[in-house]
Amino acid sequence: MFHYAILPTIVSRNAFLVTIIILLSILVGCAKKTATGPEEPQQEQQPIQLGQTPWPTFQYDLQHTGRSPNSGPDAPTIKWEFTGIGGLPILGFDGTIFLSSDDNNLYAISSTGSLNWTFATTGFHGTSPVIDSAGTVYIGTDGLVRGIGLDGSSEFVFHTNYLSGSPPIIGPDGTIYAGFSNGDCSGGNFYAIRSSGSAKWVLETGKGEPTTVPAIGLDGTIYFGASNCRGDQSWLYAINSDGTLQWVRSVDFQWLYTAPSIGADGTIYIAGQGGVLMAFDPGGTRRWEYNVSPRGARNSFILGSLAIGADETIYVGSHLPSRPNRGFLSAYSPSGIFKWSTETGPIYGSPIVDADGIIYVGADCCKIVAINPDGTLKWEYGLEGGSLRLSPVIGPNRTIYISTDGIKGDGPFPLPGPSRLFAIGEQ
């Protein structure tokens, strides 16, 4: 009985002590929270990706469709022009125009046409910068990939042992891709670069020297073109995101400068000198090819890349070396069926498509042409200041940006002059 009588007392005392300890712990915890404030929730760091700007990279997106969500002008007029720079522009988050110019400088121009800053580099830049989701602008210079901040300061430099390189592109996981070569028949390398500026992997491309902007499919496969140093043989490469080779296909082009474009079903389209347009399925099988040269003419030259409309129509611009004042914008179905062709004047750059399906292209010399989806002319607008051998881009407020290269004429004695960047908007 003694033990049974005392046990509840001992348990009660122990329970009381435990309760006091718990209450003190709660009070201390509350005091700490009151003194330091509530704990901030941890935010996950988002990976760097391609910037969601009005025009962040070559031909707008990773698939190089050249298709913008914005509309172009119905009645065009020059809003402003900036003299002394020429190249392929991209657009930043606030509408700033970034342009890797032919004078070896990267320019940042405000949406109203004033100079924000310049960044001097060594050697030729390639064709087009690219901007990431943090606002860093990347350019490929001779043997380097540079990252430049929004204030024009250098953020990182990636060095290679090569002399020239293709313009870079940014993958879905923030990896930067670019190809480099020496142009001396020793082949080249294709690089995957972390956003911190270190190499992720390197793929040797054999005899092929990378010559195009890479494109990235919806499944993450990376595609790029390469040519040998003599320009008499070219290849299309398909690379996995871990750097392993999926496949490589020989294509019947001379120099291959046109970047691959990728359709919604994964079809890869490329075109080249000789006027041949080709389509490959994702496994590397050639689906079809079409010579865009008009009847009675020698092979056309295609130097710009393609555009793909919302209905998957493929648009390609060309010019005729045998007839220097002639060139065409042509349209083809995804299955390779010819739809229409409109004579525009010589086209050296890439067509682009706006939200309404209107196709825009620069034609030499010297006008920008707007074509309706059925191939009829919507308008054309003449520009002074040199040849329009580069591609336009579309920004907000129905504004198109395009630059001239300062060279007038196709004859043996073209006239040099300053390059100009034009903003063309609604009247």
Image (spheres, grey):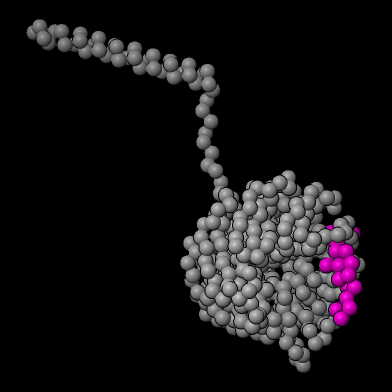
Q: Is residue 402 above or below residue 411?
A: above
Image quarter of the C terminus: bottom right
Residue 416 in the magenta stretch? The answer is yes
The spot of residue 359 in percent (x, y) is: 76, 70
Nearer-the-camera pick, 413 or 108:
413
The spot of residue 9 in percent (x, y) is: 20, 8
Image quarter of the N terminus: top left
Residue lying at the far bottom in this picture: please name it: 296
Residue 39 lies left or right of residue 19; in this view the side is right
Residue at the spot x=75%, y=52% of the render?
119
> Splitting the image into 4 quarters, where does residue 205 fall?
bottom right
Provide the residue span drawn in magenta: 405-427
> Splitting the image into 4 quarters, where does residue 371 fall?
bottom right
Residue at the spot x=56%, y=76% of the render?
207
Nearer-the-camera pick, 200 or 251:
200
Q: Is residue 12 above or below residue 50?
A: above
Residue 418 in the magenta stretch? The answer is yes
